[in-house]
Amino acid sequence: MKTMLHTPLRFLNLLNCVGMIWILLTMMFHFVELPRWFMYGGLGLFFATWLVEFVCEKRWQGFKLRWQNGYFLLFFAFFLLAVLYRPWDTDTHFERLLGYRYPLLGFGLVGLFGLNSYYRLRWLFIAMLVIAVGIGAWILIHVPYHSDIPFYAWQEQFAAYRVAHVNAHMGFNFYLNVALVGTWFILFRDRIGLPWWALVLVALSGLFCLGLLLISEGRTGFMMGMLLTTLLLTIELFRWRKWLGIALMAAGLAGAGWMVTHHSRVNEHNLQTELRFLYWRSAFELIRERPILGYGISRAQEEFSEVSMKYVEEEWRRAQWEPYRQRLDTHNQYIQCLLETGIIGLLLLLAMYIGPMILDDNHRLLSITLMGICALQSVFDMFVTGQFCTMFCVLTLFCLVVPHASRGETPAA
């Protein structure tokens, strides 16, 4: 019976991997009018095949709760915390905002019981690099640069085309930064068995992603890319020659500082008029009233909609944000958690970020890096309760569930 089931199960396992790669592809897109089957087909394929795997392989047999898989119970706790507020919350935004958290349930279950044996971090990162390079090249082909066009004008065309057909800069740049981490991981931690030409292609792909970050209008992704490149290369050089690592850190920090200060959106005027700072100021007025328990996810949205425009200039308010005010969030995951579920929600969020950094015994630097950029991104945008929820869940699987190298190592119990 096992022999008869082996081939269909193998095909099912590979189909589940295809579903994951499909998810990685669709994570590059957001706020774009694309067919529903394309945007959600990968999730459907992945979870459908995983459930069949779960039943056919009887994964509940021999199940043991360890620290690594027990971590995913935090996903359920964070989701249920919003539900616990339901009797005292409002109906206005509850279903919509709860919908952002649904990936926590699905991927939390996957994290508890694991993935099939075909998964490898190397191939998942290579898939992300191929997706990032392919989509980046596609944009550049459709927005060619001509010498008679000022560079800043071409940047605006690049950004407009990317927003219309792929994603806004926050999501796009975050994906590129994860691809950069994957480049480092393959080149320095998991290159055994790869031919020289494959390593060259991986390195060139990483340089291409870094180049895309350099021309992006997003400050967070740009600065994160500079910081990642400097720190990871410094670590590797330091392991080889300490003096080279120290020299690179000094040169890299100086170069990154120069590039940051000369970035088109990093100047005194932009920082003084930064809308996020005004939103945070408004949110803290609400948080001071209920710092322990918060308001609930829907009531918090209603309250913030009322005060979010308090410090924004009247002209800007009418022209830009008034039509979107009812759906406007704080653009900060930590502040949003305080606003919605108080200190308890914030502590759960921090535990979800810090957990993989502590629990990953096989490739801790990778987990620290991936969770670190998630934590940094959360300062400037919604993450676990926004468009990045699926990506965060997938990255935690990368850290704690997916086997490490081509040797087939699995995270330690």
Image: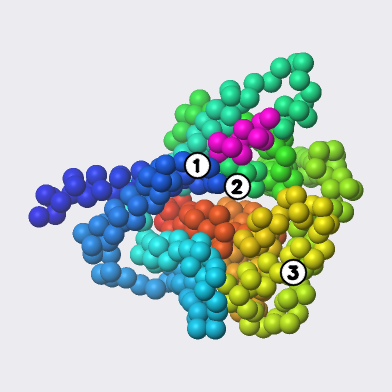
Vertical order, 85 against 17 (above or below):
below
Q: Is residue 144 visible?
A: yes
Task: Pick whichever of labels 3 and 2 is earlier in the sequence.
Answer: 2
Q: Secondary structure at mark 3?
A: helix
Determine which of the numbered discs, if any, sits on residue 323 in the image: none
Q: Residue at x 55, y 77 (%)?
A: 90
Return the residue nearer the eye: 320 or 192: 320
Q: Residues within 10 Å of mark 1 (few under 14, many from 20)?
A: few
Q: Which residue is mark 1?
A: 33
Within the image, what quadrant is residue 180 found in? Answer: top right
Amino acid type at mark 1: Glu
Span highlighted in magenta in the image: 157-166
Q: Residue at x 55, y 79 (%)?
A: 89
Image spot of residue 84 (x, y percent): 50, 81
Determine which of the numbered discs, if any, sits on residue 307 in the image: 3
Task: Pick whichever of labels 2 and 1 is earlier in the sequence.
Answer: 1
Return the residue nearer the eye: 236 or 133: 133
Q: Secondary structure at mark 2?
A: helix
Within the image, what quadrant is residue 216 found in? Answer: top right
